Amino acid sequence: MAGGFAGGEVGAGRAEFYEGKITSYFILACIVGSFGGSLFGYDLGVSSGVTSMDDFLIKFFPDVYARKHAHLHETDYCKYDNQVLTLFTSSLYFAGLVSTFGASYVTKRRGRRASIMVGAASFFLGGAINAAAMNVAMLIVGRVLLGAGIGFGNQAVPLYLSEIAPYRIRGAVNQLFQLTTCLGILVADVINYFTDRLHPWGWRLSLGLAMGPATAIFVGALFLPETPNSLVERGKLEEARRVLEKVRGTHKVDAEFEDLKEASEAARAVKGTFRNLLATRNRPQLVIGALGIPAFQQLSGMNSILFYSPVIFQSLGFGSSAALYSSIITGSMLVVGALISMVTVDRLGRRFLFIEAGIQMISSMVVVAVILALKFGHGQELTKGVSTVLVVAICLFVVAYGWSWGPLGWLVPSELFPLEMRSAGQSVVVCVNLFWTAAVAQCFLAALCHLRWGVFVLFAALIVVMSIFIILLLPETKQVPIEEIWMLFDRHWYWKRIVRKDPKYQGHHHHQQQEMAGNGSSC
């Protein structure tokens, strides 16, 4: 199984017998399922743009507005350092963090599709309340509902896409989540660019338009198939087989269906899924998938640049519209990165993309830090040449993140967990991810104010640590069936010493070898 050994006989090398083609039913499932990412992306983009709009600041944060226009010598880095303003952004992530555990229950008991629908409904309500907000309390309530929507969506969508996809293209399909997230950010940036000119209510339109993608996802989800993995897990075997045949476009699904059933039987034998994450045999999934990758995805500094790219560019003296325009450029870079990743992830592999992007991101952050250290913070605007170099460096950083930590931060954890704790594991992934998102969001402007250019050196140092973590601990998962990924840890130079200590693992490993030997002789 995809990392757990509770059912040793699962995935006894049947992958070569999997059959199927790309069907229209599968394409529809991918399109609607992946649109869950657009909710997350739209919100990331919109909240960063709205917090730099004068009309919004005058109504809710007049002191920030006054400081923004004071252009004082010491406030270049500190204009937006307001804990209530950052709470507007990060309240969403704290809400998502809590709601993801409710999402885990719904995803496991009611299916992946149900979680996607609950998320869409909550997001719709949040968008409506934010658009009508009359005070900071209404804004925060709206953000909390949006956060609950994102908690459900981010928990269910990567699982849905990983499970519905044929294993040979699982990487590309799962990355539809990141692509729609990036498209959501880009659309939000473009909308902000135009609503910034609609005084004094443009920000309401930006926040209210979140209801659009939420409605589309809810309606689309009514027609989605549930994943065969989820149906088998809930004991609906006939329906699972029917959906599998329909999604794969063939009746020859015996090998894949057997793997699903065995994974499910192993899952039922496991009690206490969250506790099971701590078992020795599941240590690699815990360290890499549940804790390491989701935390590092945020500690790369990318979301800080996204949240506050209009604010950063404005602080750097680019002017209000120019700042939103710069955000559109960084949003476009993310989309380009996501498309490159979709094309290359199942060919070049996950590790190559992580390592190459690490080098590119470290270089870009050092360039940004050096420019800011030498040229910025003296109350004067940057020259055109220096500003251009700064934007190029930020773009190179964003595009590298767009083909590495962005999409792979969701893809790799969703591949690693065994079926019996895939839902619980994904909840921990989302929880860790949102915790660090919220923490970084809450601290970034204060850090920018106090550390100044040093904050970018700090992110560069963290990316060095992240890249070493990947090089040493992550095995390559490209083109490995999802219920067979656990075998990689058994062969990994470091993890094999740990997983083999688990007594449950040893008995089942012996059974596994017998089963595979049996398969070999019967062929």
Image: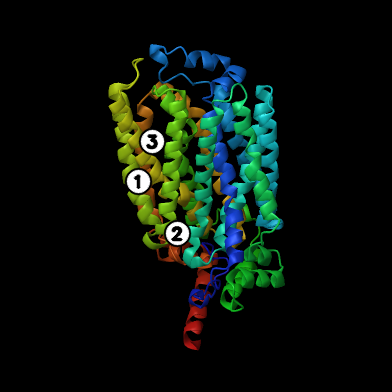
Does label 3 or label 2 sit earlier along the sequence?
A: 3
Percent across and percent down for residue 65 are: 53, 16
Percent position (x, y) of residue 131? 66, 30
Would you identify the image quadrant in which residue 371 lies?
top left
Q: Is residue 18 above or below residue 414?
A: below
Which mark is drawn over residue 435? none
User: Alpha-carbon distance for marks 2 and 1?
Assistant: 27 Å
* Residue 196 is at least partly visible in this image: yes
Badge 2 or badge 1: first in the primary sequence: 1
Marks 3/2: CA–CA distance: 31 Å
* Labelled pair 3, 1 in contact (Cβ < 8 Å): no
- Disc 2 residue type? Ile
Q: Is residue 199 left or right of residue 238?
A: left
Question: Is 219 rendered above or below residue 395?
Answer: below
Q: Is residue 261 visible?
A: no
Camera-near label (2 vs 1) is 1
Q: Position of residue 59 (x, y in %)?
A: 62, 18
- Secondary structure beneath dot 1 equals helix
Residue 459 marker:
3
* Image depth: mark 3 or mark 2 in front: 3
Give the quadrant of the N terminus.
Answer: bottom right
Q: Relative to the observer, which residue lies in front, 169 or 105?
A: 169
| Residue at mark 2 | 498
Asked which secondary structure carries label 2, the reply is helix
Residue 358's label in the rendered image is 1
